[in-house]
Image: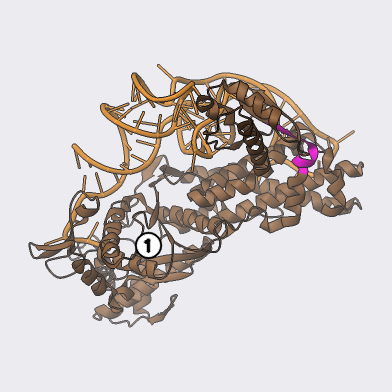
Chain colours: A brown, B orange
Amino acid sequence: MKDHIAELINSALTQLIDNGTLPADITPRVTIDRTRDKSHGDLASNIAMTLAKAAKKAPRDIAQLIIDALPASDKLTKAEIAGPGFINFFLNEAAATAIVTQILSEGEKFGSSNAGTGQKVQVEFVSANPTGPLHVGHGRGAAVGDSICRLLKNAGWDVTAEFYYNDAGQQINNLATSVKARILGLGPDHESWPEDGYRGDYIIDVAKSYMAGETIAAEDKHVTGAADANNDEAIRDFAVAYLRREQDLDLKAFGVDFDVYYLESALYEQGKVEETVKQLIDSGHTYEKDGALWLKTTDFGDDKDRVMRKSEGGYTYFVPDVAYHLNKWQRGFIRVINEQGADHHSTITRVRAGLQAVSQTDNLNIPTTWPEYVLHQMVMVMRGGEEVKISKRAGSYVTIRDLIDEVGKDATRYFLAARAATSQLTFDIDLAVSQTNENPVYYIQYAHARVCSMMRKLSENKWNWSAETSAQSLELLTEDGEKAILNKLAAYPELVKAAANNCEPHTVANYLRELAGDFHSYYNSHKMLIEDKPLRDARLSLSEAVRQTINNGLGLLGVSAPEEM
RNA sequence: GCGCCCGUAGCUCAGCUGGAUAGAGUAGUGGCUUCCGAAGCCAUUGGUCACAGGUUCGAAUCCUGUCGGGCGCGCCA
């Protein structure tokens, strides 16, 4: 519909330029917006105001010229000037209700597009260290990252969801020594407790399982506890497998799936880290100082250079990161989106610097803005009116599992995805737990369940409804409440497309809240199951279109759309 | 000190890449059910969009500065 009106305007502009009314050197950029106020019609354009200066005419005069030159359209009842020079367009019934027919025929596909043209995009998210249970910050990453994947798939991209396991760094040694200490019966307060040990009680569980000789079935391998307190290597492998499995179970319960689990250790095993180091040295952007090898990240906008290889010989964390991203590039992802916590913000410059150093030398043509980042701000967890500190090292933090158990998967996912990633988020556990019924997600699901309930009641009255036989009745949808819903439904495809482009799943959450609100309001003021068949058909069609849209939208958020509650 | 993010109703947050009179939820107040699900609806209270400049037809939105908050700034990851 927007396209249709844009065509009309462009046609009018062409005519006005051809007959000399408007100068030929103007470059109109026609945008069509949905109006917020129904007295402003259904759609509006600000084209006259943007042309005013170049055309040296008053905005309202230009608007009138455009309106007079508009070609006839069978979709509009009128176009009029308003305010400082807006052109408001009013749709006729047939054009306004066409969206219902479209939704009912497209079903689950309503809102999907081929904008991504099947191109490869990778979304890396969560990527938690396998050193403990996932906390609420990971939960935000999981909810946002997974929704971005769903949005991109919906927009026609070929999406790979990927989880990067940092299973090769110093933190894994800390994990192993922590488990070993627990095996020996030591607690975090003991004087022999490892300095950077993980203090959480889950370490006890790992130790017990290891000593009991249990077998862990992780994603890629099975590991059996050696029950040997002195076998450091065995403890280490077992602990990593154990915690990976735990994270996998949490993510599964959260409705999040990954296509690829990429191990940092694999980069070392396959020599990719060494290879990358060589490439960086060959690029000429490195130097030796104080026994360490440095990368001149200042050549690429960093405020100081960074150590690549420590004087003791090991690599700093960002070197395998660069190797990993070179690997992503080699795998053909023209777009890579890294969803991570804002506390990792400083890695962006380093990774991009490393990539550019290699790219420029080897002519890889990696864009300077590749990979893209979506950084979610911190989640503050409140309980009992006090902040719960999220600290892996302290061992005291709220886990995803806690939230799923207490609040439920749907509400947790909705809550964590419903806010812009750039904003900090306060997750009040008491509120979420005690006021479960007032959580917005139930409000949306309730609208869905209500329509389902209506459809069940329909047959009890020995009535029937079908999209096909109701098509002619749709023009009966002329009331304000109905038009509001029609307009909202019509906005859905462009909304999800924008959400995918901008990696902003929260806009979908807000949209659904509004749509559900419009529907609840309509439902309360109109009876649907009435004797008048044409009107009944029209209202049921509209309701079913709302249900379908809610179903599709909730699917993008990974939230279920129950038929009854 | 430097970098990134944020500052909108008592509280939690939206505000569609600059548009028309700034919106929701929640909290408060007052109503709605012989009838399709009251997990609902209706009405109402509540704003110097942190502050000051700038850009232009037009700014919560873009730019600059100030103040306030969060997160980074390691030869940790």
Residue found 23% across the figure and 80% down from its top: A230
The answer, for residue A559, to whether it is visible in the render is no
Residue found 69% across the figure and 39% down from its top: A487
Q: Is residue A142 magenta?
A: no
Q: Is residue A520 above or below residue A559?
A: above
Q: Which residues are magenta?
A: A89-97
Chain of the residue where label 1 is placed in the rendered structure:
A
Q: Is residue A436 above or below residue A278?
A: above
- Relative side of A372 to A358, left or right: right
- Relative side of A545 to A161, left or right: right
Identify the residue position indicated by label 1 in the image: A128
Q: Nearer the viewer, residue B36 or A148?
A: A148
The answer, for residue A396, to whether it is visible in the render is yes
Q: Nearer the viewer, residue A105 or A532?
A: A105
Can you give x and y, in whole percent of width and height, for residue A284 in the image? 18, 64
Can you give x and y, in whole percent of width and height, for residue A235 in the image? 30, 77
Of all residues, the one furthest to the left in this rendering is A290
Q: Nearer the viewer, residue A16 or A67?
A: A16
Q: Is residue A478 above or below residue A214?
A: above
Q: Residues within 10 Å of mark 1 (few under 14, many from 20)?
A: many
Q: Secondary structure at mark 1?
A: loop
- Relative side of A264 to A253, left or right: left
Q: Is residue B63 above or below residue A396?
A: above
Of all residues, the one furthest to the front in this rendering is A19
Can you give x and y, in whole percent of width and height, for residue A272 in the image? 29, 74
Q: How many numbered markers are drawn?
A: 1
Q: Amino acid at mark 1?
A: Ala
Residue found 32% across the figure and 51% down from its top: A345
Can you give x and y, in whole percent of width and height, for residue A390 in the image? 35, 51
